[in-house]
Amino acid sequence: MPQRKTFLTALSAAGLAMTFSRRGDARTREPSGAPSSAAVPPAGPTPRAGAAAAGPVSALAAATAAAMRRFDPHLSDADLAAIARGIDDDAKAAAALNPPGRRLRNGDEPVTVLTVRSK
Amino acid sequence: MTHEDIAFADVATLQRLLTRRALSSLELTELYLERLERYGPAYNALVNAMPERARAEAKRADRERAAGRVRGPLHGIPYGVKDLLAATGAPTTWGAEPYREQRFDYDATVVKRLGAAGAVLLGKLAMVELAGGFGYNDADASFTGPGRTPWNRDFWSGGSSSGSGAATAAGLVAFAIGSETSGSILFPAASCGVTGLRPTYGRVSRHGAMALSWTLDKLGPLARSARDAETVLRAIAGSDPNDSTAVDRPFAGIRRRPKVGVLAKATEKTMPAVKANFEASLRVLAEFCDVVPGVALPELPFDAAVGTIVNAEGAAAFRELIESGRSRELRSVDDRTGGYVSYATLAVDYIDAQRRRTQMVEACRLAFGAYDAIASPTLPTVALPIGIPFDKAYPKYPGAAGLISAGNATGLPALCYPNGFGDNGLPTGMSLLGGAFGEAKLSAIAKAFQARTDFHTRRPPVGA
């Protein structure tokens, strides 16, 4: 389990102000492709993508996770590690939404669109 | 009939008993209240019984019946709701410790409609905290404890409508209301051996229901049979000024031999019993349907889309909880941190997921439009064991089988019914995915299946 030092290092490397805007960097390092079975949504019975997976987390995910201490200062290092892993895993799963070779085009609209009513 | 026979009777049978005055609604309500109290804790199925409200509603139903007024097939029939529906007279806890004392001073539209149909609200049924939106990874994810299936209490009743499934299966209510964002009606229906009907998105108003994901959430029945499920759905369906997504649409049945497609590779990664029961079920369907094998699911990222949408919308829905730091009060260790993960979902990923859904709706319409239903096993396994993380429980059968993500991403209806038994005496389930607002077609097929089989009438060893 990563130690607090890991997160402090990550924070200094990435910078809190950049954590959200640069999260895409972490994603581009991950292989893309079809979603794995582990990408089944959390509203079902299956855990988050790769929730049990070990291995290092990206610096950006670690920094983003560390930023969550502003909401709960009692989050432990293990908690932050779990959050960081979750962020990386979700980014990996989300990469399947727009994979190379099958990119969404400019005109592809979302299902949710504004409905204007006159009255 | 014994009390046990009455407790497990379907709605139509109960209505006949009430019509013949063999039983009053109040007597039926007392029977179920007693069973909820006696057996509910064994399955962690009950949050709060509502005896005063139930007795008042039952007495009203009996008075009206005596005066010659019967509102319909649910008149005087007792039921329970998943504890994410607002109802006066009890807390609405959303299954989560931070909301344990939460109360609303109004009834959800579904509760109002069932009341208008003459049904009797018995109480609030257990659920996975926040309907599972924070990524729980084991059955112990509610302040009421892990839901237990009445078929084998060492195994989970499924989620997130855990109590709705268990209480219906154990004869503690005549039927129950659950909700589904992605699997939360179908999963407990399969795990508990009952019939669950996930309506088309927009068929049923969500007003007064906890929001997890505004573009995915649906409410629907868990019942003893497809006939009961359709009866309940008809009572709760329709437009609602308090929910702009709810619409009035007819229930169109089938006037010819149904055509059922079978999802390609549906049994590739399932337990042997799930596979065997599914194949046997297809033979039953072939008696009255044209069964077409090998219907492929369009190759689109259904799982990723639904997961991203639940994360983003769930983080928004529970933003106050997340930012307050009170996630730490949640039961599941994974849920205590999961909200923060969701909070970090990129806006562009969320929008891309919604853009993919446009393609998914059209692709599924083209792929499935020629069929009245697409059949698949509901789950690759029987119910999950309690005390083992989900991802460790059945490592040979990873992930969800079939059509749960695709059906929820596209807003299509699905009906799950029991089709046999497998390991550890646990039931297996089969699902039918339908076209938009095609619930009556699904029900017609399932009713014909249940007329030829008896899995839906089997009783678990309640009290054993």
Image (tube, coloured by chain):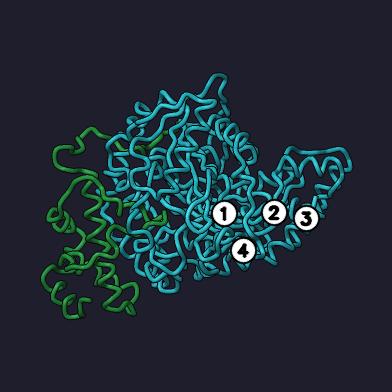
Label 2 to label 4: alpha-carbon separation: 13 Å
Q: Earlier in the sequence, mark 1 or mark 4?
A: 4
Label 3 to label 1: alpha-carbon separation: 21 Å
Q: Is residue B158 above or below residue A54?
A: above
Q: What amino acid does circle 4 point to?
A: Leu
Q: For the residues carrying marks 2 and 1, which lies nearer the camera in this image?
A: 1
**Circle 1: element type:** helix
Q: Residues within 10 Å of mark 3 (few under 14, many from 20)?
A: few
Q: Given contact means CB atoms under 8 Å apart, are the residues at marks 3 and 1 in contact? A: no
Quadrant of residue B450 within the rendered picture: top right
Residue B427 lies left or right of residue B134; in this view the side is right
Label 3 to label 2: alpha-carbon separation: 20 Å
Q: Residues within 10 Å of mark 1 (few under 14, many from 20)?
A: many
Q: Colour of chain A?
A: green
Q: Colour of chain B?
A: cyan
- The residue indicated by pointer 1 is B165
Q: For the residues carrying marks 3 and 4, which lies nearer the camera in this image?
A: 3
Q: Is residue B212 above or below residue A107?
A: below
Q: Earlier in the sequence, mark 2 or mark 1?
A: 2
- In percent of width and height, residue B189 lies at 53, 49
Q: Which mark is residue B322?
A: none
Instruction: State which chain disc 4 sits on.
Output: B
Q: Earlier in the sequence, mark 2 or mark 4?
A: 4
Q: Which mark is residue B121?
A: 2
- The residue indicated by pointer 3 is B3
Q: For the residues carrying marks 2 and 4, which lies nearer the camera in this image?
A: 4
Label 1 to label 4: alpha-carbon separation: 11 Å
Tell me which residue sits at (32%, 78%) in the image: A73
Q: Earlier in the sequence, mark 3 or mark 1?
A: 3
Q: Given contact means CB atoms under 8 Å apart, are the residues at marks 2 and 1 in contact? A: no
- The residue indicated by pointer 4 is B46
- In percent of width and height, residue B461 lies at 64, 59
